[in-house]
Image (spheres, rainbow, N blue to C red):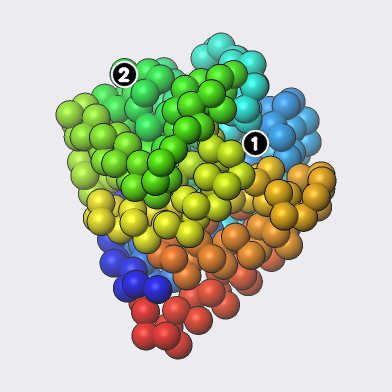
Amino acid sequence: MTPRKTYCLPLPPGPRPGDAEGWGRELPLGGRTLVMGILNVTPDSFADGGLRLDPARALDDGLAMLADGADILDVGGESTRPGAEPVSASEELRRVLPLVEGLAARGALVSIDTYKAVVAREALAAGAVIVNDISGLQYDEGLGGAVAEAGGGLVLMHNRGRSREMYREAVYGDVAAEVAAELAGAVVRAERAGVARDAIVLDPGFGFAKRAAHSYAALAGLERLASLDRPILSGPSRKSFLTEPLGELAPVERDWATAAAVTASILFGAHLVRVHRVKEMVQVARIADRIRAAAGMP
């Protein structure tokens, strides 16, 4: 383990109703690990597709995640699993905007999981404070500008290629080194688009353009990202690489495996973890944080 540097992620201006933590215009990263709950409103996401097509159900699930300890809710309107079909911006907006508005009105910190500039812009205007981009600003050249204009946070995930062909790009010599180098390039793209460096979070992208062995190597080498001096988000939740040593398991049967990967992520320096089962993973995060503290590693 290495010390985990602390950061303050700036948030867009605007009211924060129900802000019990008193975070106001900044999100502190590096004290306790923050938990991001996954809230997909899609018919085809790999782990929870079709569960939240009813807007009232989606809002209730989001509020339940907040009650269970989620710090941030990550709303997604397009499945980005390998091989997934893209959806139009208008359809994505139809799915996500009511939920973003409803959650923000209740004081939630909302992240919008999108790579489209128009979706990001509308979601930020509706109350989202972070954009979570699986492409690392490779799919839509206008996305960085949309984030910069709103003053939002930006998660840059490592990826290669589009969903349909990403596994063709899963060729590495040194996974951790290449992921770090390519994320450094994403940071440059973001800064050139006007995004403040302080607003950037990095995600190694487990499962994206990575075979199982590559995802494990990226997880084991997570500390390499510390050299980029930005907070780290880890998203191993229920992903298929977890089944490689275990055999076939349905996504909903992968939560124990997720707990192990979340623990390792935190011990290797992640500041945030993105998960499906919030209540249980909050417990996992608190114990991993305690282990870090006992080892003298903040």
Residue drawn 30% across the image and 58% down it: 226
Q: Secondary structure at mark 1?
A: strand
Q: Quadrant of residue 251?
A: top right
Point out which mark residue 24 bears.
none
- Looking at the picture, which amino acid does disc 2 mark? Gly
The residue lying toward the viewer, choosing from 209 and 256, is 209
The residue lying toward the viewer, choosing from 255 and 143, is 255
- Picture quarter with the C terminus: bottom left
Q: Position of residue 7 (x, y in %)?
A: 28, 61
- Picture quarter with the N terminus: bottom left
Q: Earlier in the sequence, mark 2 or mark 1?
A: 1
Residue drawn 41% across the image and 41% down it: 173
The residue lying toward the viewer, choosing from 295 and 247, is 247
Q: Quadrant of residue 92?
A: top right
Q: Secondary structure at mark 2?
A: loop
Residue drawn 80% across the image and 50% down it: 247
Q: Quadrant of residue 279?
A: bottom right
Residue 11, relative to residue 112: is it above or below?
Answer: below
Q: Residue beneath label 2, please?
A: 142
Considering every residue shown, the one lying at the far front of the view is 173
Q: Residue beneath label 1, please?
A: 40
Residue 130 seen from this side: no
Q: Position of residue 14 (x, y in %)?
A: 33, 43
Q: Position of residue 291 (x, y in %)?
A: 50, 81
Residue 251, relative to residue 191: is it above or below?
Answer: below
Q: Is residue 249 left or right of residue 183?
A: right
- Looking at the picture, which amino acid does disc 1 mark? Asn
Residue 178 seen from this side: yes
Q: Residues within 10 Å of mark 2 (few under 14, many from 20)?
A: some
Q: Residues within 10 Å of mark 1 (few under 14, many from 20)?
A: many
